[in-house]
Image: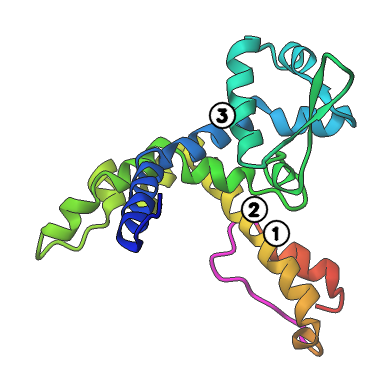
Amino acid sequence: MEVSGIEEEEARAEVDIWNYVFGYAKIAVVKCAIELGIADVIENYGSPMPLSELATALRCEPSRLHRIMRFMVHYRIFKQEPINQHTVGFSSTPLSRCSIKGGEKSMAAFILFMSSPPWLASWHCLNSRVLETGNNISPFEAANGKDLWSYTETNPYHNEVFNEAMACVARLTVQAIIKGCPEVFDGVKSLVDVGGGNGTALSLLVKAFPWI
């Protein structure tokens, strides 16, 4: 049966709206994987890791863990490979290595920050901030009663998550700057990072350009 252009467009719209409906699931599953340390365990294993061994290492219920792994294999976060005729295992990918805690190219800390309850609560206040006039408070402040900086100052755990997230971004961006345009630091003797957090960016720059 021939499908018209309009029917095809409507079918595509239905697919897209379902993706929006369950859009939260991706970040929720990746957050779960980071908190469990799935990428770390599989990377350290060094070869395709059977579900049974992964569940034992993580102290997880195997059938529930299997659902999480199926989801992440579908989105190419991990690979599923045969070990023998009866068993398959899970292997790392470049994408899964982005969720290894403390990895050189890890985005784990930033993902945990962006999926933290205080940050997610901000998005639930977005419509009220758009509708309200004469009040310039941010969605974060509307949701949490304080702006980001005040909230971070009074919540040690959130402060730690925030600093780790910023350091995570700094590692990625500064390494790109060092690799892509090192010449801009020629002759620079002193460098100040205003609002530099825990100093991750400066430490990388000084290591790459020791004359600073």
Outermost residue toward the bottom in this view: 187
Q: Vertically, is 186 above or below 166?
A: below
* Image coords of residue 69 (percent x, y): 64, 27
Disc 2 target residue? 168
Q: Secondary structure at mark 1?
A: helix
Q: Earlier in the sequence, mark 2 or mark 3?
A: 3
Residue 170 location in percent, x, y?
Answer: 65, 61
Q: Which residues are magenta?
A: 188-198
The residue sitting at 64% across, 53% down in the picture is 168
Q: Secondary structure at mark 3?
A: helix
Q: Which amino acid type is marked by label 1?
A: Arg
Q: Residue at x 29, y 42 (%)?
A: 144
Distance, label 2 to label 3, CA atoms, is: 19 Å
Q: Is residue 22 above or below residue 138?
A: above
Would residue 199 be found to the left or right of residue 15 on screen? right
Tell me the residue that label 1 is attached to.
171
Kindly indicate the quadrant of the structure image that contains residue 181: bottom right
Which residue sits at x=84%, y=70%? 208
The label shown at residue 32 is: 3
Q: What crowding class fits label 2: few (fewer than 14 Cα within 10 Å), some (14-19), or many (20 or more)? A: many
Q: Give SS at disc 2.
A: helix
